[in-house]
Amino acid sequence: MNINKQGIAALLLSFVSLTASAQSISDLSPEQREQLEQRMGSNGANSNQAPPTNVSQSQVFGDVDPTSPLSTQFAEQQVRSSWSTGTYGPVMEEMLSPEERNQIRPFGAEVFDGGFRVKRSDGLNPQYRILPGDQITLRVWGATEVDSVLSVDAQGFVFIPSVGPVQVQGVTAAQLNSVITSAIKTTYPKNVNVYTNVQGVQPVGVMVSGYVERPGKYAGVPSDSILYFLDQASGIDNKLGSFRNIDLIRNGEVIKTFDLYDFLIDGELNQPQLQEGDTLLVKARGPQVTVYGDVGRAYHYELAADGVKGSRIEALARLNPGVSHALVVGTRMGNPVADYLTINQFADTGLADGDEIAFFADKRADKIVVQVEGKYLGQSYFVLPKNARLMEFLNTVAVDPQETDYKNISIRRQSVAERQKKALEESLDRLEQTYLGAPSSTAEEAAVRAQEAELISQFVQKARNVKPSGRLVVSNEDQLVDIRLQHGDVVTLPAKTDSVLVSGEVYVPQSAVFVEGKSVEEYINGAGGFTQRANDDRILIVRQNGEVIEADNTDLRPGDEVLVLPAVSSKNLQVAQSITQIIYQIAVATKVALDL
């Protein structure tokens, strides 16, 4: 059958649309199979006709806008809907594992870690309002004398001898003295002095209920903060409770609703004075989004309502410098959706309950920073184009050719150090897995294995603390390789030297003057010779450019280091070989002969 490319595409599109929810053709209903056969026949009969050119995207995929952020139209059937916008579907509903999610707390949860539980107000602040049951110290001298402690009765009055009852309920502590003085001067207008002080306040019991950890009735004073009572109840339930919807109920009526975000962000917590029998009711949590990534505040944030713009979350989460994108994963109309947005796009995006938002600094810099060390002139840090190479960089570094050994340049690179560390860790893991758990058939063998296990454990502990240098050899037969530089590279320009360093398992590690034709053995003898633990078959030469070679039949150069490796004292040949190989790895990565 002669079906052109357009016909094949149309046929495949028909097949995909009919089998979007089927595993195979056999899973199709009879009506769907008949429809597919008709389309196949139609395509075969008209295979020589030109394909329609006026078919819009909406006719193929439906009336949708695939470029809209967090679109839901493709979520069920389309594997990839828009590479350009980053809208994908179906997607994983969760970006965080349950363990990772449990580590993220609601914004403001730290408030109830016990800080308000320890200290409390004594109720004697200037704005405290007098209540029935409070004790007031009154002293009057001059035309009359009074020295007593007055109790505020149930009607809010105190009784002053020779003056009568005075209304003080609702009067602030700062106003109390003037109110009492005015009342006394109605009877004694002249030559009278008054002193008042709130001696003690009547404690109150406040009910704390709703979504808190320990609902109940808690004691305090009327001027105590609601945070004190919430903390007494061990705080708000982190999973179910709201930090933005807390009612203060008095005599069956809500007299104020608190949003703790006002306190957390702006330091505002305007509350009326509490009274006996008040109730703090923590409502159920509202819509919530989870924020993490390159942010200063990774929390669960409670939204005032669905549809809150992303700009509000940006302000709350305090994005780190350089953040450029936000990955939003959530559900819309029951369908999982995801969108990868620029920060500007995210600022205008409406959010919904359950959204997970990860912020990233996802812009690639077009510059790199490279450092030089060793013998050079001028500055040590350079900002270069991203594709800069070693040779063009070296042309910008000023050196004194009489002092700098420019033929032995090397590079310390972080990625190389990481690979060296990973390779070393893998070797140590294999060593432990192979020998530490090996069974023994006899008591004598068990004793030998115990000694070997102790040797291996001590060696592994030392080896894991080694930090590879990440040295990258960039010379080949005294010729530099013009490699591309990476951000963070440290280019080493060694100084010219006339010495050779002898280290490792020798009695007197030292630097000796380089003498043309002097052998490795002669330098070792000059350093006192091999120690008893030396492995005289494993002697390494470390060049100034970072190259490490065996000492056999190698001519020394100025600046070389002769490194004598230790021998492994184990009767198990395989153990000895494994440890020797790891010692060699460490020597190459760090220029250190790790001792056993």
Image (tube, helix red, strand yellow):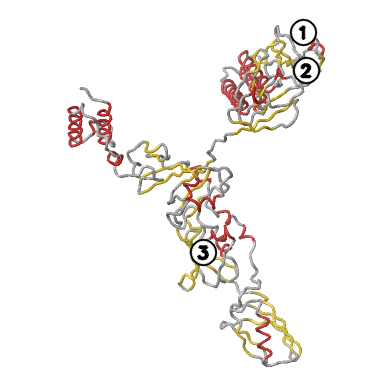
Circle 3 residues within 10 Å: few <14, some 14–19, many ≥20: some
Q: What residue is disc 1 on? A: 519
State the separation of the CA atoms marked 3 and 1.
84 Å
Locate the C terminus by quadrant: top right
| Quadrant placement of the N terminus | top left
Count of numbered tags: 3
Q: Nearer the viewer, mark 3 or mark 1?
A: 1
| Residue nearest the observer in this picture, 376 or 13 | 376
Marks 2/1: CA–CA distance: 13 Å
Category of crowding for the residue at label 1, using alpha-carbon neighbours closer than 10 angstroms: few (below 14), some (14–19), many (at least 20) = some
> Is there CB contact under 8 Å for labels 3 and 1?
no
Percent x, y of residue 513: 82, 14
3 vs 2, front mark: 2
User: Can the viewer see residue 313?
Assistant: yes
The location of residue 443, given as percent across then percent down, is 61, 18
On the image, numbered disc 3 is attached to which residue?
258
Q: Is residue 476 shown left or right of residue 139? A: left
Residues at badges 3 and 2 in contact (C-beta under 8 Å)?
no
Q: Residue at x 41, y 40 (%)?
A: 92
Above or below, 241 relative to 192: above
User: What residue type is disc 1 on?
Assistant: Ser
Label 3 vs label 2: CA separation? 73 Å
- Give, as a three-letter code, the residue at label 3: Phe
Label 2 secondary element: strand
Amino acid under disc 2: Leu
Toward which corner of the image does residue 10 lie, by quadrant? top left
Helix, strand or loop status at disc 1: loop
Query: What residue appears at the point 60 percent right and 84 percent down from the top-left corner?
Result: 167
Tell me which label, 2 or 1, sits earlier in the chain.
2
Which label sits on residue 339? none
When the figure is inspected, residue 499 is found, relative to residue 79, above or below; the finding is above
The residue singled out by tag 2 in the image is 501
